[in-house]
Image: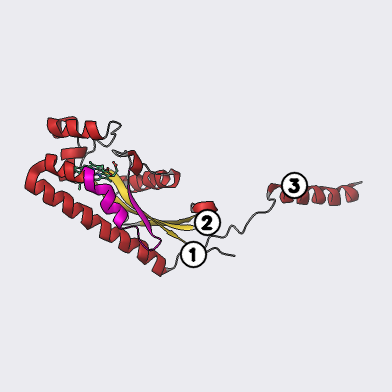
Amino acid sequence: MRQRTRPIVALILALAAACAAPQERDETPPTADSLTVARARDAAAALGPDLMGLLLSQLDRGGPEAALTVCVDSAQVRTARHSVDGVAIRRIGTRVRNPVNAPDSLETRLLAYLAAELDAGRLPAEFTEVARTGADGTWELRYLRPMVLLDRCTACHGAESEIAPRVRTLIASRYPADEAVGYRPGELRGAISVRVPLPATQ
Ligand code: HEC
């Protein structure tokens, strides 16, 4: 009796395994070569100073109100300009002002990880992961460059008392669902997020 049940059990297990993974594709993630990582890094490195330069020059010239107007009009346009050669780039926040900048589920998980690393005093300058998040489940390199809040950012992202009333009114009229306030300097504000498609493994 014992002798007989073993092959049957083995058969059932084999069938169960086959059913659990009907036509699974190869799950081995491709590796992102250094050139691909460099493309993501270069895109993030170019966008950061582009936006920051614009923001800081406007802050110096006309204060938060003028800077806000420029930010509202230019942030998305300038960001989009850096999405070239198949590289997709955007800014995301742990809480967002513009819903377009809301993180997807992978970005939400990575932002939580980066916030914990920042708390532990070891925030990396960048973080990469290979994930099947492309169109039709294709593989992508996901690259995040974290952004920490600076003193100057509180004029628009700080506590209510730190944001001038006119600026608050402008923000409220343009971003009625704004959640990107109440940040303290040194806190994780968000990240520049880059995606680069990767070739399939098979
Ligand atoms: C003059 C006001 C102003 C200042 C100062 C400012 N921001 Fe913003 N920030 C904005 C506006 C407006 C948006 C929404 C832009 C858009 O529509 O994408 C925004 C969006 C962002 C986003 C994208 C996520 C989101 O909430 O939509 C990040 C990240 C961000 N800011 C980081 C910073 C950092 C870091 C600093 C300081 C270096 C800073 N900001 C200073 C006005 C400001």
Amino acid at the residue labelled 2: Thr
Specify the quadrant of the image occupied by residue 176.
top left
Measured in 3D between alpha carbons, the distance from the residue under mark 2 to the one under mark 3, in whole angstroms, is: 27 Å
| Magenta region includes residue 79 | yes
Looking at the image, which residue is at 20% across and 37% down? 158
Q: Which residue is mark 1?
A: 31
Horizontal side of 62 relative to 51 (left or right) equals left
Residue lying farthest to the left in this orientation: 61
Amino acid at the residue labelled 1: Thr
Horizontal side of 159 relative to 117 (left or right) equals left
Some atom of ligand 1 lies within 8 Å of the CB belonging to the residue at label 2: no
- Which numbered circle lies on residue 170? none
Measured in 3D between alpha carbons, the distance from the residue under mark 1 to the one under mark 3, in whole angstroms, is: 31 Å
Give, as a single range, the part of the protein colored magenta: 72-93
Q: Which residue is mark 2?
A: 138
Q: Residue 51's x, y, as percent? A: 22, 53
